[in-house]
Structure formats: structure tokens, C-alpha cells
Image: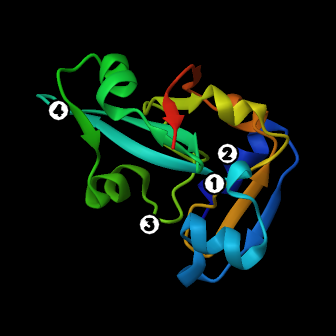
Amino acid sequence: MVDVVLEALNLTGVGYEIIECDPDLADTTAFCEHYGYKPEESANAIMVVGKGEPRIYAMCVVLATTRIDVNKSVRKKLGTKKASFASPEEATEITGMALGGVTPFGLPHDLPLWIDSRVMGCEKVIVGGGSRNRKIYVPPHALSALPNAEIVESLAKEA
């Protein structure tokens, strides 16, 4: 079986590091504390949904030290009256990835990928690896090289 995450990573042409991790330590805070990475260089991939018919989805990438602005920035960008976080089941069904391992790499090409501009200020950033047993340490321009990627100002707010 083809590893769509690694395939997407390799297509960016950007160097990266795969970090194997204990699946029980995949959540950002636990991962950073156990493996010695800074939350300021960790980014979370969060699926959002615009309420209505049909439901509209997007994947957002924000630094772990920020909070995604679902009620204003995301809702406006989706063009809906209401927006929220997608359910774990929706995120898994759309991405094929388990929560705690969701990554911007290997997403469906028709799923918008919005990257908070603060992520681009990092030298390198840690993101999910497609499963709970690995992370990816990569320069952020690898994220912006992905299909449907868009850098968005103020997608998140300081926590």
C-alpha cells in the first residue's frame, strides 16, 4: 500500500524528518513534554465545518500556542452563518487519519488547506504524521507547497 503522507511529503521536494513516537503520547502537549519539542514549533491540523447544506469542510493548520478563530475567521472564510470543529468521525472519514495523527500531507486534493500565517514564521514545525505513532518535522514552506494550501492572516488568535 502506498503511504499517501510520505508520497505528498516527497512531492514538495522539501527535506523533512520523521519522528517515531509512542501513540499514547501523540497529543501535542504530551508529545512536546516527553520528546523535548517546543509548543511554539508545533502545529495542529484541525478540521472545521461550515454548518448548512451541503456541509463545507476545510483543514486548518495553527500553532499549538494559538487558538483557531472558528467563530470569525473560519466562518467568514467558509462563507457560512455558523462554523464549528468537525466531529472526530468526520475528520477520520474525510482524511483517513486518526485524531492525534492528522497531518496536512496526503489530504484529499479538493479539501481546502488553510495555514495560519504564524506557522510560516517558524524555522521548522512539527505536524502530525498521518497516524498516532509518528510526527513530521519540516520547514513550513513544505506546507504552503501542498495543493489547495493557502496562507491566511489571523486564522488563529493568541491563546
* Residue type at tag 3: Ala
Choose the circle earlier in sequence order: 3 or 1: 1
Choose the circle earlier in sequence order: 4 or 2: 2
Q: Secondary structure at mark 4?
A: loop
Locate residue 55, reporting x and y percent. 20, 33
Compared across the picture, whether 9 is left or right of 73 comes to right
In the picture shown, does residue 40 fall above or below 23? above
Mark 2, other Cα within 10 Å: few <14 / some 14–19 / many ≥20 = some
Q: CA distance from mark 3 to mark 2?
A: 18 Å
Q: Between tags 1 and 4, which lies in front?
A: 4
Locate residue 52, reporting x and y percent. 12, 29
Locate residue 2, reporting x and y percent. 62, 60
Residues at marks 1 and 4 touching, judged by CB atoms closer than 8 Å:
no
Compared across the picture, whether 72 is left or right of 8 comes to left
| Residue that label 2 marks | 8
| Residue that label 3 marks | 98
Q: CA distance from mark 4 to mark 2?
A: 29 Å
Question: Residue at point 75% right, 40% down?
Answer: 11
Choose the circle earlier in sequence order: 4 or 3: 4
Q: Between tags 3 and 2, which lies in front?
A: 3
| Residue that label 1 marks | 5
| Residue that label 4 marks | 51
Question: Residue at point 46% right, 29% down?
Answer: 112
Mark 3, other Cα within 10 Å: few <14 / some 14–19 / many ≥20 = some
Choose the circle earlier in sequence order: 3 or 2: 2
Compared across the picture, whether 98 is left or right of 9 comes to left
* Residue type at tag 1: Val
Q: Secondary structure at mark 1?
A: helix
